[in-house]
Image: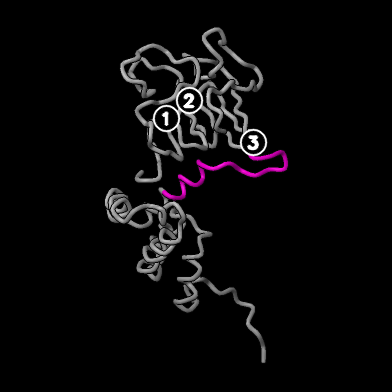
Amino acid sequence: MAVSSRPISIEELPSHLILEILSSGRLSAVDLACLENTCRTFRSMAEFAAFNVCCGNSIFASLPTVARTELFERCNGNWKRVMRFLQCVEQSSGLVETSAGNMQITTGSYHTLLIHDSSVYSCGSSLCGVLSHGPNTKQCCTFNQINFPSSSRVIHISASYNHAAFVTESGEVFTCGDNSSFCCGHGDVGRAIFRPTHVEALKGVPCKQVYDKCFFVYHDVVS
């Protein structure tokens, strides 16, 4: 009996196999949206697959039921958008294990932050203190280690145009940079913050991640 060499498209597969592929976690939310728009077969499956992926996501699973519902509603009742949000958090968050040790890197407009194991480094131009080396440092051509004020190691960093933010393993948040609009979170202190300074307003709130472009904080209770 001759075996056909004709390629088989995914829509020709049994529906349970298609759903298994879509729910495997190897496709992004954008991939699901594209499949949904290009083939009628996937219109009912893509959203259900995104729901399955979200339910299996460790970040989503750690949220209380109320927080999950709020996130779903903020994504306009679209599980692909929830999935996209969770994937963005994962892609921008944790340390990456490399042959040189655990690392994370992020960039602003004129500066770069780097975590290498338990140490934090910065380089670039220091607009209003974003390099965290004090008021006398205006520029670093190579990575220089930041003298961090906490004994707890830094596990997450974030950079924007003229701000820097750090989260420690103990859940504390530190920020530095331009504070003329009070966006570093240090109350009515309107001056520039030249070294990482603990955000007292978040004391007692164990944080995991911070995004200083809009000062979004993800912590154990709600995001």
Indicate the position of residue 171 as horizontal and vertical percent values.
Answer: 46, 37
Q: Residue under label 1, please give it.
A: 212
Depth order, front residue of 126/76: 126
Quarter of the image for residue 178 reads top left
Which type of secondary structure does the marked residue at label 1 adopt?
A: loop
Q: Is residue 148 left or right of residue 63?
A: right
Give residue 189's position: percent from left, percent from top.
35, 14
Q: CA distance from mark 3 to mark 1?
A: 22 Å
Q: Earlier in the sequence, mark 3 or mark 1?
A: 3
For the record, the magenta segment spans 86-102
The circle drawn on residue 117 is 3
Residue matched to label 2: 164
Q: Nearer the viewer, residue 198 or 223?
A: 198
Report the Cα–Cα distance between label 2 and label 1.
7 Å
Q: Relative to the observer, which residue lies in front, 29 or 89?
A: 89
User: Taking 69 as reference, is 124 left or right?
Assistant: right
Looking at the image, which residue is at 39% across and 68% down? Answer: 45
Q: Is residue 105 left or right of residue 62?
A: right
Colour convention of the picture: one colour
Position above or below: 179 against 172: above
Tally of numbered discs: 3
Amino acid under disc 2: Ala
